[in-house]
């Protein structure tokens, strides 16, 4: 349920209403919008009569029920106002959300060695990426495949951050590794295979680093938003939703089916920022540029793109990784669409 306060409601009145509602056993959350303040209510609201809440204060404009099962993640909960996720990095704040330039996260699938991660970080930065991605702990289908260098790779990510000032995005697979990963990561990635690892979701929800929640490969949009709800309900409001392709019947030409229709769908039901990952979404480097451009055209807030200095030698996901040169060219193409939509940072970074 949400309580919409009238324009110009005094601050003390908002506090008083919130305190009164807390006394009813509800958890009020103040959401400051562009024009109005909304108090989101979570708890046992099903039996509450909105008219009784309305009587608490003449400053209450309306009391509305949130119909969706994902309460905090719903657009209704913020009365239609999209949220922003602000990620502090050594190069400055990176902001994810509608109305901001598209944020591009780029880097290798896995962190392989110091030279490659630093070289990749420098090149993607030069091309305009704002954050570096790279897996230290890798969720691999086969136990015999490269599993990531683990803790030592975290040190290499820290070195790449130091060298470039780029913030770091890396995956947490196991709650036991969370603290040490959070020391280096600026955004914690929850991979597709862990989207419904509820104990992990609660754990990342109880710490302050922003979370990138990838869609499970067979998750419905509701299941995905319910997973986000776990993180929000545990107290972390900074969640970015990443579409990375879903399983369908035909994997002959593409690894997954990149569901770009989620962009307008999510926009209509959630306030959370959206990211599209065309690398895992297609599984083939040659298809990545078209889907990245389509995602920007469709209004994504961010992109995640795998880039490797030598894709044919990559220890994981080489076939879907762009070379730094191809990434730089893609960034130039994306800029044309991004600028047209007024969603691209200017001035442009130097061409590689
Ligand atoms: C990754 O980002 O390298 C990764 C393993 O992603 P996903 O969880 O989407 O497969
Ligand atoms: Mn990968």
Image: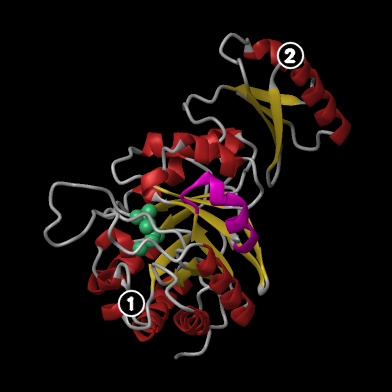
Q: How is the image coloured?
A: secondary structure
In magenta stretch: residue 281: no
If the image is split into quadrants, where does the C terminus sit? bottom left
Inspect this view and state whether residue 82 appears. yes
**Precedes in sequence: disc 1 or disc 2:** 2
Name the one closer to the observer, 135 or 122. 135
If the image is split into quadrants, where does the N terminus sit? top right
Q: Answer few, some or many: residues within 10 Å of disc 2's Cα (few below 14, many 20 plus, some between 14 and 19).
A: few
Above or below: residue 23 compared with residue 317: above
Q: In the visual, does 341 lie left or right of 92?
A: left
Give the number of the disc on residue 24.
Answer: 2
Inspect this view and state whether residue 75 appears. no
Residue located at (32% from left, 68% from top): 316
Query: Dividing the picture into quarters, in which one does residue 300 lie?
Result: bottom left
Q: Answer few, some or many: residues within 10 Å of disc 1's Cα (few below 14, many 20 plus, some between 14 and 19).
A: many
**Magenta-tinted stretch:** 172-184
Q: Secondary structure at mark 1?
A: loop
Q: In the visual, does 93 lie left or right of 169?
A: right
Above or below: residue 202 compared with residue 88: above
Query: Dividing the picture into quarters, in which one does residue 19 lie?
Result: top right
Residue located at (35% from left, 67% from top): 292
Q: Position of residue 63 (x, y in %)?
A: 64, 22
Name the one closer to the observer, 30 or 280. 280
Gap in angstroms between the C-alphas marked 1 and 2 = 55 Å
Q: Secondary structure at mark 2?
A: loop
Name the one closer to the observer, 140 or 67. 140
Where is mark 1, residue-wise? 322
Quarter of image, ligand 2:
bottom left
In magenta stretch: residue 176: yes
Q: Main secondary structure of the magenta part?
A: helix
Q: In the visual, does 136 lie left or right of 109?
A: right
């Amino acid at each position: 349920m949400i309580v919409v306060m009238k324009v110009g409601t005094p601050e003390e009145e908002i506090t008083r209403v919130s305190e009164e509602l807390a006394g009813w056993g509800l958890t009020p959350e103040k959401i400051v919008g562009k024009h109005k303040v909304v108090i989101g209510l979570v708890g046992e609201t099903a039996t509450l009569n909105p008219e009784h809440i309305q009587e608490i204060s003449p400053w209450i404009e309306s009391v509305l029920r949130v119909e969706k099962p994902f309460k905090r993640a719903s657009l209704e909960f913020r009365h239609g106002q999209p949220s922003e996720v602000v990620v502090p990095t050594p190069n400055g704040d990176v902001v994810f959300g509608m109305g901001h330039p598209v944020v591009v996260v780029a880097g290798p699938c896995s962190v392989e060695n110091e030279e490659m991660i630093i070289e990749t970080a420098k090149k993607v930065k030069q091309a305009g990426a704002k954050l570096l991605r790279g897996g230290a702990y890798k969720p691999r289908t086969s136990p015999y495949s490269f599993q990531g260098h683990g803790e030592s790779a975290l040190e290499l990510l820290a070195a790449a951050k130091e060298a470039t000032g780029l913030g770091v995005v890396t995956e947490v697979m196991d709650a036991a590794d969370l603290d040490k990963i959070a020391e280096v990561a600026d955004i914690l990635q929850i991979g597709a295979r862990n989207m419904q690892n509820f104990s992990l979701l609660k754990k990342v929800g109880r710490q302050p680093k922003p979370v990138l929640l990838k869609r499970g490969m067979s998750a419905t949009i509701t299941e995905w938003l319910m997973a986000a709800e776990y993180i929000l309900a545990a107290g972390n409001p900074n969640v970015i939703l990443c579409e990375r392709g879903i399983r369908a019947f035909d994997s002959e030409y593409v690894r997954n089916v990149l569901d770009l229709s989620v962009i307008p769908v999510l926009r209509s039901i959630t306030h959370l920022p959206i990211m599209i990952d065309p690398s895992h979404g297609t599984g083939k480097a040659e298809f990545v540029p078209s889907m990245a451009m389509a995602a920007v055209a469709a209004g994504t807030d961010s992109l995640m793109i795998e880039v490797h200095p030598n894709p044919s030698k990559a220890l994981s996901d080489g076939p879907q990784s762009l070379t730094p040169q191809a990434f730089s060219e893609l960034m130039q193409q994306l800029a044309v669409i991004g600028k047209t939509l007024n969603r691209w940072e200017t001035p442009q970074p130097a061409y590689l």
